């Protein structure tokens, strides 16, 4: 029997958002301010009242997004943002890279390579022509945005995602420009086939990387791949594909691009399964201190179902492309480039990031740098109110890039 109404359908979604807004103004904010006056009542005693309020507000906003599915950026992969101040182009699909396990997944899910938008962003004060050859000492930042594979955008005016990119361009002298790919976002509605499930995002991210290495001829060692949250998950999948494809070349097929010179993972999603959802784990103990609500963090949520599509949920437990930190499998990181992981001690994903750190450290040794800020939240380097942790982490990252 069809339910009387669904919160993700109009007009119910709009009415729900309006009611939540009115409730927050009339009751939520005043109660939160009063309850946060004693430091002992804040999620972290080191937090200011401002940070306490900001974290709770973002968490509630994301909770509303999860219930209504009014995720920003969902259809932006189909439209190229053009106009003054935007350096945009269409990126052609990399059909020749659909091979091996990736070909099996595309055949099973029906996902096909597609043309998607890409955006360039320059360091403040610079105006670099698209396609200009790389300069001595320069490194190209290849950005992969987060959003749980169901939200956000690569557009230069996208909140948080573009803020992270701009901070890296501002802080790291070697980064003069960044390229971001508008990979397809997943969607799932009752009674309808999944839209853009795995491996759609991986296909698009591979196309963006191939654009840099093959179309523009940028040396792979001068490319730094950077992903935040689910973008970190996608960045790991990209590198894993390159490692495995180069280890097992197929006769008669075009070459696979070389490995990037470095990898930056900001609050990476590293386990799409349930192996870190145990009593006493960070996904529960940090549920009141992070911006990510439990409704989004758990593996059984909409974003997981939309991304996995028709794949067996058990696949997420053991597939290294989906859950490289899963406790249910042994995953190798041999052949991966030097990696910087940024994590916050107040994150719900903290435990899986620590597992990822241990595994990468075992194979990379000193090639891995793990930076954990005790009271920082998810993707804190993109949040202006997360000081001094934000500036401290950016400084350490800039020093790492400089070598």
Image: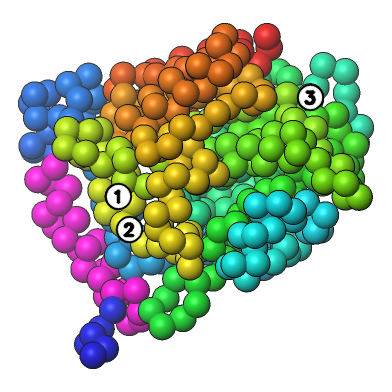
Residue 146: percent from the left, percent from the top? 51, 45
346 relative to 64, above or below = above
Total labels: the figure holds: 3
Name the image quarter holding residue 213. Answer: top right
Task: Provide the secondary structure element on which disc 1 rests.
Answer: loop
- The tag on residue 221 is 3
Q: Which residue is mark 2?
A: 301
How far apart in space, not on screen, are marks 3 and 2 (Cα)?
A: 37 Å
Residue 209: percent from the left, percent from the top? 75, 43
Task: Provide the secondary structure element on which disc 2 rests.
Answer: loop
Which is nearer the eye, 344 or 249?
249
The answer to whether the residues at label 1 and label 2 have Cβ atoms under 8 Å apart is yes
Q: Residue at x 43, y 20 (%)?
A: 358
Which is nearer the eye, 21 or 78?
78
Is residue 317 rendered to the left or right of residue 283? right
Which is nearer the eye, 189 or 162?
189
State the predominant SS element of the stretch in magenta. helix
Is residue 44 rendered to the left or right of residue 64? left
How far apart in space, not on screen, are marks 1 and 2 (Cα)?
A: 6 Å
59 relative to 397, above or below = below
Residue 328: percent from the left, percent from the top? 37, 39
203 relative to 53, above or below = below
Mark 2: give few (<14), some (14-19) or many (20+) Cα within 10 Å: few
Based on the picture, tell me whether residue 204 belongs to the magenta stretch. Answer: no
Q: Which residue is mark 1?
A: 298
Q: Residue at x 55, y 44 (%)?
A: 321
147 relative to 184, above or below = above
List the single residue furthest toward the bottom: 1
Mark 3: give few (<14), some (14-19) or many (20+) Cα within 10 Å: some
How far apart in space, not on screen, are marks 3 and 1 (Cα)?
A: 36 Å
Which residues, given as a range, are shown in magenta? Answer: 7-32
User: Quick one: label 3 or label 2, which is nearer the N terminus?
Assistant: 3
């Amino acid at each position: 029997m069809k339910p009387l109404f669904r919160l993700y359908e109009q007009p119910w979604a709009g009415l729900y958002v309006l009611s939540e807004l009115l409730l927050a103004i009339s009751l939520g904010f005043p109660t939160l301010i009063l309850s946060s006056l004693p430091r002992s009542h804040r999620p972290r005693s080191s937090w200011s009242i401002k940070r306490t309020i900001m974290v709770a507000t973002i968490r509630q906003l994301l909770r509303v997004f999860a219930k209504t599915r009014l995720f920003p950026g969902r259809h932006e992969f189909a439209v190229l943002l053009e106009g003054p101040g935007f350096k945009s182009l269409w990126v052609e699909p990399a059909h020749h890279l659909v091979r091996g396990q990736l070909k099996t997944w595309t055949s099973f899910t029906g996902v096909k390579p597609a043309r998607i938008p890409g955006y360039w962003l320059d360091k403040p004060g610079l105006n670099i022509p698209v396609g200009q050859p790389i300069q001595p000492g320069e490194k190209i930042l290849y950005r992969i945005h987060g959003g749980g594979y169901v939200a956000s955008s690569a557009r230069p005016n996208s909140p948080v995602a573009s803020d992270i990119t701009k901070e890296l361009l501002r802080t790291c002298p070697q980064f003069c420009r960044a390229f971001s790919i508008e990979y397809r976002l997943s969607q799932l509605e009752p009674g309808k086939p999944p839209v853009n499930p795995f491996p759609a995002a991986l296909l698009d991210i591979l196309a963006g990387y191939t654009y840099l290495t093959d179309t523009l001829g940028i040396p792979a060692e001068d490319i730094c791949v950077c992903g935040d949250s689910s973008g970190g998950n996608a960045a790991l999948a990209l590198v894993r594909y390159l490692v495995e494809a180069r280890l097992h070349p197929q006769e008669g097929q075009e070459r696979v691009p070389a490995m990037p010179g470095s990898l930056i993972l900001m609050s990476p999603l590293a386990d799409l399964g349930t192996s870190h959802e145990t009593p006493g784990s960070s996904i529960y103990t940090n549920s009141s201190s992070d911006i990510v609500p439990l409704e989004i963090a758990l593996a059984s949520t909409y974003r997981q179902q939309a991304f996995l599509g028709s794949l067996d949920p058990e696949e997420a437990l053991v597939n290294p492309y989906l859950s490289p930190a899963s406790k249910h499998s042994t995953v190798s990181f041999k052949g991966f480039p030097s990696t910087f992981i940024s994590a916050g001690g107040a994150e719900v994903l903290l435990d899986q990031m620590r597992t990822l750190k241990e595994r990468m450290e075992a194979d990379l040794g000193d090639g891995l740098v793990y930076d954990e800020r005790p009271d920082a939240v998810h993707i804190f380097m993109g949040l202006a109110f997360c000081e001094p942790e934000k500036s401290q982490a950016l400084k350490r990252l800039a020093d790492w890039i400089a070598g």
